[in-house]
Amino acid sequence: MHVEPEGIRVEPAEEITDSPTDWVAAHIRDYVESKGEIGHDFNGYATLLLTTRGRRTGTLRRTALIYGRHHDDYLIVASNGGEPKHPAWYLNLTADPMVTLQVGADSFQARARTATTTERPALWQKMTELFEPYINYQMGNDREIPIVILEPVGITAN
């Protein structure tokens, strides 16, 4: 921490570790540097940046994901590209559901939760309409691919 000339205390920003996957890290870098001008629309899909806290290390970790909307909430799919295990970011947010989102130029806190069995069918339909490969990911998997609902915290509508 240091004190600015006006006497305002400023805490240093906590370091964020981006995805170890090269193309995802490049996407994140472009997204952050351009405030979403480059990267929000990625190959025709709307994407957001999700920052979670590592469940074992406590390190902030950031990845880029396709998203959909449901009312005021954001939806993401823990598909892990069709792999048989949940992605690390999903395991992290189940341990600590408070996350940070960047959508375009806007950054804000959200609370993450997995869609219930009642909510999932309609949300799954919505997300597979946005990104059809999710259907094949699920068909080739024994695990049910979770849909995560990200509920913005502390944002008031105009």
Image (spheres, grey):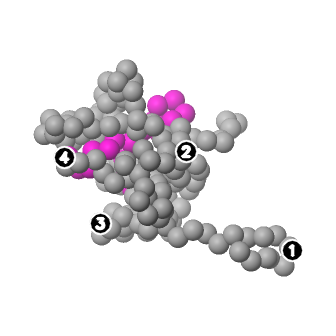
Q: Which element carries disc 4, helix, strand or loop?
A: loop
Whole-angstrom CA distance, mark 1 to mark 3, is 42 Å
Q: Nearer the viewer, mark 4 or mark 3?
A: 4
Classed neighbour count for the residue bearing mark 2: other residues with Cα under 10 Å, few (<14), some (14–19), many (≥20): many
Q: Does residue 119 sit above or below 98 in this rendering?
A: above
Quarter holding the C terminus?
A: top right
Q: Is residue 40 visible?
A: no
Q: Magenta part of the protein: which range?
A: 64-82
Q: Which of 147 and 57 is in front in this view?
A: 57
User: Amino acid type of disc 2?
Assistant: Ala
Q: Does residue 70 sit above or below 131 in this rendering?
A: above
Q: Residue drawn 53% across and 52% down?
A: 100
Q: Residue drawn 73% across and 70% down?
A: 10
Mark number, residue 110? 2
Q: Which of marks 4 and 2 is in front?
A: 4
User: Amino acid type of disc 1?
Assistant: Glu
Quarter-of-image position of residue 12: bottom right
Left or right of residue 134: residue 152: right
Residue that carries the numbered disc 4 in the rendered image: 84
N-term mark: 1 or 3: 1
User: Amino acid type of disc 3?
Assistant: Thr
Whole-angstrom CA distance, mark 2 to mark 1, is 31 Å
Q: Which element carries disc 2, helix, strand or loop?
A: strand
Whole-angstrom CA distance, mark 4 to mark 3, is 18 Å
Residue that carries the numbered disc 3 in the rendered image: 21
